[in-house]
Every structure is written in C-alpha cells, then in structure tokens.
Amino acid sequence: MKIALFSAKRFDRLSFDAALPAYPGLSLTCLEPRLDAASAVLAAGFDAVCAFVNDDLGAPVLAQLQAQGVRLVLLRCAGFNQVDLKAAQALGLTVARVPEYSPHAVAEHTLALLLTLIRRTHRAHNRVREGNFELDGLLGFDLHGKTVGVIGTGRIGRCVVNIFQGLGCEVLVHDPVPHPEVTARYVPLDELLAASKVVMLQCPLNAATHHLINAERLARMPRGSVLVNTSRGAVVDTKAVIDALKSGHLGGLAIDVYEEEAALFFEDHSDEVLTDDVFARLLTFPNVLITAHQAFFTEEALAAIADVTLGNAAAFAAQGAPLHPVRGS
Ligand code: NAI
C-alpha cells in the first residue's frame, strides 16, 4: 500500500521513518503541502492519504482523492471534525484516526498553559533576562483549594481531572456521557461555569459544541475566572471571548487552538503582515497566552501516532478495515 503523507514536517518524517520498518507492506511519501483542492492532485497513484488537523477533507477534496484512486484517509490525529464524513461514506472512502496516542501529553500541556498564565512565568522569564527583577504585575493565585471545571471527561479530560485533583482542587465535570471511573462531581454546564475559577475544555468539536463558550456562557462565569482551551478552536466564540477580556470579566485566556488556525498554525509567518484582526487583538492582551497547537507534541505521542497510523493502514491492506475507523465513514 502506497501512502501520501500531506503537511509533512521534519518531525513527521523522523517519527514515521522510525515506525515504518515494522510494516513491510507499506510505503510512505512525505509531501510538504497542506492537503487542499490545489494539492490533492499530488495523491494520484497513492492508495491512501495521511492527513493532519488543518488539512482540507471537505467533500470536493474527498471526491478528487477518490477519483484519483485513493481508498483510505489516515488521520494522524484524534479529532476528525475536519472530515466531511457523509461525503466520505458516499464516496466509499474509509477514514481512520488515532483515537489515543498520549492523552497525558495534552493534559500536561493544559496544566503548563494554565500555570504559565496565572503565575506569569513567561513574563517573569523575559523580565529576568532584561535584568528587571520587579514583581509588580506578576501576582498569581493558588490553584490549591480552588474549584475548577473540566468540560469533557474522555481520555484527555480524565487525565486533566486526575492532575487537578492531585493539586488539591475541587474538580467539577460536565459530559453528556459520564464516565464510571471519574470521581469528580458531574454537574450541569451552567453550574460548572458559575462555580469554577478555571474552566478547561476537553470535548470534541461537533455541531453541539460549536461556540459552546459564547457570550451568554462567559457571562455565567465568575468575574476574573480563567478559560483554557486545548480542544478545538471553534468550541469557543473568539469574538465573545475578546469582549469578555476587554471588559475585565474574563481574567485570563490560555489557548492551544484557534478557530481560524488553519491559516496560521504550523508555518512560519514571522516575515508577513498579520491579516487576521481577531488573532491580532488576542495578541495584545497581557493575560492571554497562546501556543500553536502543540499540546500533542511530545516524543511519546509522535511515536504512538506513527505506529497507530501505520497499523491502521496495514489492517486496511490485510483485512479491508483499519484498526480505528471513524464512525460514519
Ligand atoms: P474522547 O473522545 O476520549 O473524549 C471526548 C469527551 O467529550 C467524551 O467523553 C464525550 O462524551 C465528551 N463530550 C462530547 N460532547 C460534549 C459536550 N457537549 N459537553 C461536554 N463533553 C462532551 O476525546 P479525547 O481524546 O479526550 O480528546 C478530546 C478532544 O481534544 C479531541 O476531540 C480533540 O479535538 C482535542 N485534542 C487536541 C489536541 C491538541 O494538540 N491540542 C490533541 C488531541 C486531541
């Protein structure tokens, strides 16, 4: 089976090259372009494409891939909101994903973002390097004893719950499908928002969670509370968040994902004029911390992503079905 891996970065080459010898029937070609209507032609002659979070897997691209002979779409990520699953099913394309590679990677990055934001370590680091040892402006707050809310108690959410219970927080959780192992208290969303000093999003992006955090729900959060999003950008209405930050109602925002990240993230734009005014406004706040979709980015996660992705391809080649199909495809 021949696989075309789109949006290939150096780290993809390294992790997939390391995993490939265990799968003798597979060959892999790394392609730098992001998968979209213009680049889909590069997949001609391949049996499968391997795509990442910001590749375009809408109906027109899927139709083009299928017409060129592609039968399998291998997502090297957990989320699958970028795929038009109805179109894939209609076209007879199988979609596979990596449901779990390291939930700890994302959960630990959630903690890293929150601690950096509320203890201002990024600002302190810059000050010390400049010879400024002033503490004004660096005041933080204890997490111990605080009530924090986790929205989504799947693989990542459960790790987050454990971490924050370990820190001595009162953890409230919300999920339409409660998990029996979670010892934190499940409460309705509005109750979680009203009670939490910190709200962390660990749910997938779908029709029900699009703009889950909007102006109305932000208003329910206590003044000065903090929002952390390491799930998907569009779970949050960014313009509403900006208004809440401007008014001072929202005390801080830490994000690893952004609604319009596809135009920005994973590339070096440092020599270009930033044309996204919403993102530009976010950058102006001293109490906003942004990383560019790196929560998954650990050695352990990359190795697991490569192995599970190639395992999906090998199973499809051998039995006609991947190990981890995406439902509906
Ligand atoms: P999972 O599928 O194990 O868990 C998701 C949980 O969210 C489930 O328990 C589900 O019932 C719950 N959920 C669904 N709708 C909800 C709603 N309306 N309100 C509250 N909870 C809801 O997924 P996992 O592995 O925990 O990942 C969660 C999300 O994190 C992924 O879908 C992906 O979007 C994001 N992610 C981000 C990464 C990053 O690098 N920033 C890396 C990996 C995942």
Image (spheres, rainbow, N blue to C red):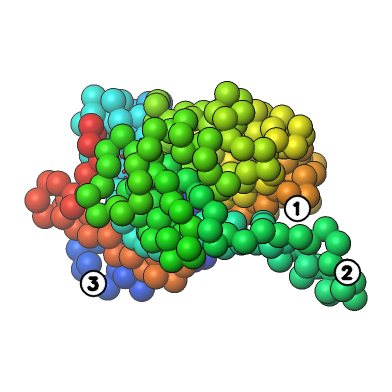
Q: Which one is in front, 73 or 218?
A: 218
Image position, residue 169 (x, y; %): 48, 58
Q: Quadrant of ligand 1?
A: top left
**Residue at 51% across / 50% down in the picture?**
147
CA gap, disc 1 to disc 2? 30 Å
Residue 107 visible in this rendered orientation of the protein: no
Q: Nearer the viewer, mark 3 or mark 2?
A: 2
Image position, residue 97 (x, y; %): 30, 48
Q: Residue furthest front?
A: 145
CA gap, disc 3 to disc 2? 55 Å
CA gap, disc 3 to disc 1? 39 Å
Left or right: 103 in relation to 265: left
Q: Nearer the viewer, mark 3 or mark 1?
A: 1
Image position, residue 138 (x, y; %): 78, 61
Q: Secondary structure at mark 1?
A: loop
**Residue at 31% across / 43% down in the picture?**
73
Q: Earlier in the sequence, mark 3 or mark 1?
A: 3
Left or right: 274 in relation to 295: right
**Residue at 23% across / 32% down in the picture?**
328
Image position, residue 86 (x, y; %): 28, 25
Q: Disc number at residue 134?
A: 2
